[in-house]
Image (cartoon, helix red, strand yellow):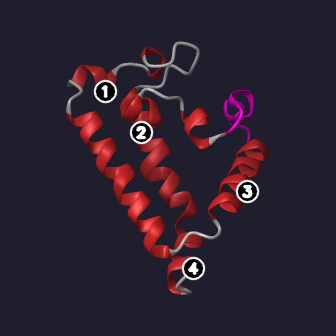
Amino acid sequence: MELLKNGRRQSETLGIERDLYERKDESTIDTINAMLQQRTADMSLHEVNADLNEVHRTLVLAIAVMPDAGLAGPWSSLEPEIHETPIIVALKDDCAEHYDAHRIWIEDLVKDGV
């Protein structure tokens, strides 16, 4: 997603070592999530929501200018050493499905007014 928005690798934007970010096994994902959660623990719900809205807005703008054929192309067309998953599928996995994976945790935070 970051690559589409600003040409930077997601690992770079998140401040995660590239080799760690690219492992993608469950233990590594849990480690990365814990690192990110620790970094953002002091953010207010208002700040988190503003950040979410900004990321969504810039993502929509980035993909709006891509032709359908570009979205159907492999992610490796953006990052050659990365997977061959079509861009549109990777976006679905990294956005909608990722959100669903954290939905209960998010709902608990919102309910508690964190």
Residue 23 in magenta? Answer: yes
- Which residue is disc 4 drawn over? 108
Q: Tell me which amino acid carries mark 2.
A: Leu
Residues shaded magenta: 16-25
**Front: mark 3 or 2:** 3
Does residue 37 sit above or below 88 in this rendering? below
Image quadrant holding the N terminus, namely top left
- Which residue is disc 3 drawn over? 34
Disc 2 secondary structure class: helix
- Which residue is disc 1 drawn over? 71
Near mark 2 (Cα within 10 A), the count class, few <14, some 14-19 or many ≥20, is some
Q: Tell me which amino acid carries mark 4.
A: Asp
Mark 2 vs 1: CB contact within 8 A: yes
Residue 51 image point, x, y percent? 43, 59
Q: What is the distance, in whole Å, between disc 4 and disc 1 at their CAs?
A: 34 Å
Near mark 4 (Cα within 10 A), the count class, few <14, some 14-19 or many ≥20, is few
Does residue 100 sit above or below 97 in this rendering? below
- Which residue is disc 2 drawn over? 91
Residue 83 image point, x, y percent? 55, 21
Q: Is residue 73 left or right of 24 when viewed as pictured?
A: left
